[in-house]
Amino acid sequence: MKEFIRDDGRKFDEIRPMKAKVGVVPNADGSAMFQFGDTIAIASVFGPKKMHPQHSQDPEKGTLRCNYNMFSFSVEDRIRPGPSRRSTEISKITEWALEPVLMIDSFPNQVIDVHIHIIQASASTRCAGINAAAMALAHAGIPMKDMVSSISVGKIDKQLIVDVNKYEDSVFKEGEGATDIPFTFTHDGKITHLQLDGKISKEDFKTVMNLAKEGAKKVYEVQKQALKDSIEGKE
Amino acid sequence: MTNRQIVIPGEEIAKGNDFLPGENTEKRGNSIIALKYGLLEESNKLVRIIPLSGAYQARRGNSVIGKVVMITFNGWVIDIGASDTAFLSLMEVPRFVNKDGLEEVMEIGDMVIAKIWAINKRGIDLSIKQRGLGKIDEGIIIKINSNKVPRVIGKEGSMIKMVKDETGCNITVGQNGTIWIKGDKVENEIFAKRAIEFIESKSYISGLTDEVAKWFKENKK
């Protein structure tokens, strides 16, 4: 069988070139950039700080507050700036993906703000956002049980693919159509977030899981290297 | 496991029972796991992680420099850069202060050196009942990352002593990363500021004291 080559020349399980950097926002307590090819996310963490208004305070544990934002110039057709249905949903999803690893119990009445900005988008923006946010939280000195790494697996017609790009996400319409499944894993292989947009069979899903796990491992290595280099690189 | 290594959260530091988990680490199963991002340090079989970035965490006994942000009927609310605001009670002022004359002692926007006396549910309590503490009248204030304060001070104050001697300025370093520089000339204050910024940017180098001595030789006019 001839090997499947995607529209941008990648193999089915090849991730776009990844790039990560820590400490990109000097005024934040922690910050990071994560890039999948043409998708670039910048996350900045502020806090832990006192939660305001006071009635939102939780005396038992701290609160994680994520804010996902796509810049109006991040896509080809300008998008309306400001919050939207989609960005509100992704903000919440990001919170759920990060909360299981965050040791937030040690910050009662306090809030950790995570701002994620997508400066350039070509699908998988939520994955890039979660990856950047996880690194930024570590950089902000927040205690965490583990790192999280996020990757999307998709299906175009009958072919499974890792790290969906814009064409595969929103342009492809042939055959069975396109499916997009973003995952977030801890580095020991537990899932903290899984979404499904489209259709997938039970049999295919098993393969998807394995592909995602392998992909997340590669993402983790990039995150780890960036965090380590940010200190050693300053010498 | 090598000493002085950077670890990230969730990373396995050591296997087996040869080491004990210290600050910012956790025993999980048969291995020790890092819970924070920072520098790994091992002494007497105890492993701990020293964070190198992030917001200031207030601790009892810390000397800090803060800014007056609010005046209440019995004291001042001070911003020290921690997650809680700090309170300096009127009782801390050694002389008589009229209840509506708190502004005469310290106004909003004034900088103050204080010691963290207690941390409780309601917040942080500050004290100025010691020599060297109290309101700052003149000089310049700079801010650095609070995690780099130990490097700026150096072993037994060696680093800060060198900066003081070289610039002829009086320097007070708050544990929260706020630094007060007071010299007889503004040029000297700015020179001290540049020196501290240099130390902050090179804070990961071993043998930093020598490096800073070299910097002074090159930059001193």
Image (spheres, helix red, strand yellow):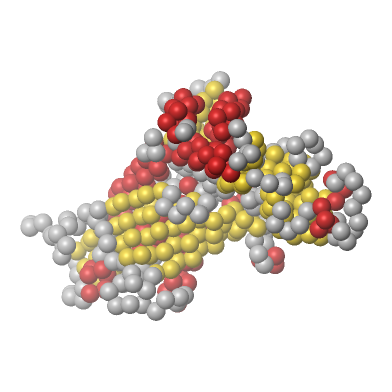
As drawn, A117 above or below B113: below
Q: Residue A225 location, x and y as percent?
A: 35, 42
* Quadrant assignment, res B133: top right
- Does residue B109 show up? yes
Residue drawn 23% across the image and 60% down it: A161
User: Is B153 left or right of B94, judged from the image as shown?
Assistant: left
Q: Residue furthest left?
A: A2
Residue drawn 30% across the image and 47% down it: A218
* Quadrant assignment, res B193: top right
Residue drawn 55% across the image and 30% down it: B166
* Quadrant assignment, res B102: bottom right
- Does residue A190 show up? no
Q: Nearer the viewer, residue B17 or B116?
A: B116
Q: Residue furthest top?
A: B44
User: Is B201 left or right of A177, judged from the image as shown?
Assistant: right
Count of number-bearing discs:
0
Residue drawn 56% across the image and 20% down it: B44
Q: Residue B2 location, x and y as percent?
A: 42, 25
Q: Nearer the viewer, residue B87 or B212?
A: B212
Q: Nearer the viewer, residue B116 or B113?
A: B113
Q: Nearer the viewer, residue B29 or A219?
A: A219
Q: Residue A88 location, x and y as percent?
A: 47, 72
In which quadrant of the rendered image does the N terminus of chain B lie? top left
